[in-house]
């Protein structure tokens, strides 16, 4: 009820075409995240869900998001973190090392959670919240996991990736994955680590951290606080 | 990508049978996995073909399983 108009932006045309129907008036825009074609202070809310790991220049994309937000507007995002699919990464690395004597990247680079806070701050966001969560999904085996990733459109896409994964290496990696990580019931886990972030565009009405030395109450008195029902505390 | 899907189709159908054949070679796979995992312990070093013997056992088991499923009707 609160959304007046909804803009869907993606660099992939097929992603836009695949989106669900909704009652909210929606405009689909084919854009590059690093160069959003909107004027400054256009949007109340920008949401990004599990797609920022594909952006090449993340600092610039975050700056763009900040630019198009109205003052007191908010950016809410979720993106994949560095521990995502570590089981797959390790299994492939070990197998490639043993079978081929070296290894090449098979997974897109991730951002570290500390860097994320800095990036949001540098982009101009105020009152940051960064949180991390891990979801473990069980698969019958490594191959089913890779099929699932392909279906999600998450296959490896870096410029320096090897063109093909040798069948022997894939077999070796599947064996390593199973031996090193399998669950009791025979399935194998895959970890998806997600960073959740919230950043606000500055507005005078927003709360700001108080000046140093201006405290009137000490933390030691916390035990003495007795908040009556219905009263908010600040 | 190829213009006709024939080659890709064959590759994909071979890949799809992968988990079934791997399941038939559980012992060999576990032996290979253990060998590789052992090299990750402190003091170990993983070099090319360190576990070649175990892998060869796995590979031949896998190939045998492939022949079996082919004969069973594909």
Image (tube, coloured by chain):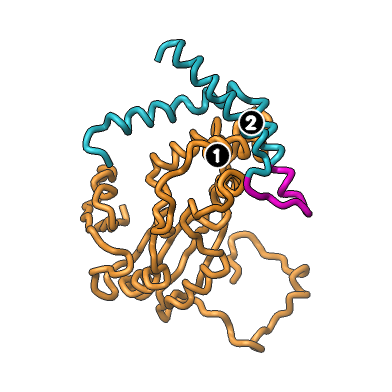
- Residue ID for mark 1: A137
Q: Badge 1: few (under 14), some or many (20 or more) residues near its Cα, within 10 Å? A: few
The reply to the same-chain question for discs 2 and 1 is: no
Where residue A19 sits, quadrant-wise, is top left
* Residue A140 position in % (x across, y down): 55, 30
Q: Is residue A125 above or below residue A110?
A: below
- Residue ID for mark 2: B29
Query: Can I make out residue B1 in this image?
Result: yes
Q: Secondary structure at mark 2?
A: helix
Report the number of numbered marks: 2
Which color has been applied to chain B in this rendered view? cyan
Chain (orange): A
Is A198 displayed left or right of A19 in the figure?
A: right
Is B5 displayed left or right of A139 in the figure?
A: left
Where residue B6 sits, quadrant-wise, is top left
* Residue A47 position in % (x across, y down): 38, 59
Picture quarter with the C terminus of chain B: top left
Chain letter of disc 1 in the image:
A
Q: Are marks 2 and 1 in contact (CB under 8 Å)?
A: no
């Amino acid at each position: 009820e609160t959304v007046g108009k909804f803009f869907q932006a993606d660099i992939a045309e097929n992603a836009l075409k695949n989106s669900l129907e909704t009652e909210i008036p929606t405009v689909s825009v084919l854009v590059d995240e690093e160069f959003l074609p909107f004027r400054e202070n256009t949007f109340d809310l920008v949401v990004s869900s599990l797609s920022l790991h594909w952006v090449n220049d993340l600092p610039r994309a975050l700056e763009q998001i900040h630019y198009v937000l109205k003052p007191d507007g908010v950016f809410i995002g979720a993106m994949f973190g560095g521990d995502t699919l570590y089981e797959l990464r390790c299994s492939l690395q070990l197998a490639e090392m043993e079978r081929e004597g070296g290894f090449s990247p098979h997974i897109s680079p991730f951002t570290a959670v500390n860097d994320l806070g800095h990036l949001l701050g540098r982009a101009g966001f105020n009152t940051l919240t960064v949180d991390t969560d891990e979801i473990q999904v069980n698969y019958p085996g490594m191959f089913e996991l890779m099929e699932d990733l392909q279906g999600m459109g998450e296959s490896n896409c870096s410029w320096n990736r090897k063109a093909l994964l040798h069948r022997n290496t894939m077999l070796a990696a599947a064996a390593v994955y199973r031996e090193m990580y399998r669950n009791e019931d025979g399935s194998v886990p895959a970890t998806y680590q997600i960073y959740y972030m919230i950043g606000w565009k500055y507005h005078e009405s927003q709360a700001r951290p108080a000046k140093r030395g201006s405290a009137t109450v000490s933390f030691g008195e916390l035990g003495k606080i007795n908040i009556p029902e219905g009263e908010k505390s600040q | 990508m190829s213009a006709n899907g024939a080659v890709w189709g064959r590759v994909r159908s071979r890949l799809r049978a992968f988990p079934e054949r791997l399941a038939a070679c559980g012992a060999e796979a576990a032996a290979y996995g253990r060998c590789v995992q052992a090299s990750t312990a402190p003091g170990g070093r993983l070099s090319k073909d360190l576990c070649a013997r175990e892998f060869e056992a796995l590979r031949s088991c896998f190939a045998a399983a492939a022949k079996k499923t082919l004969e069973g009707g594909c």
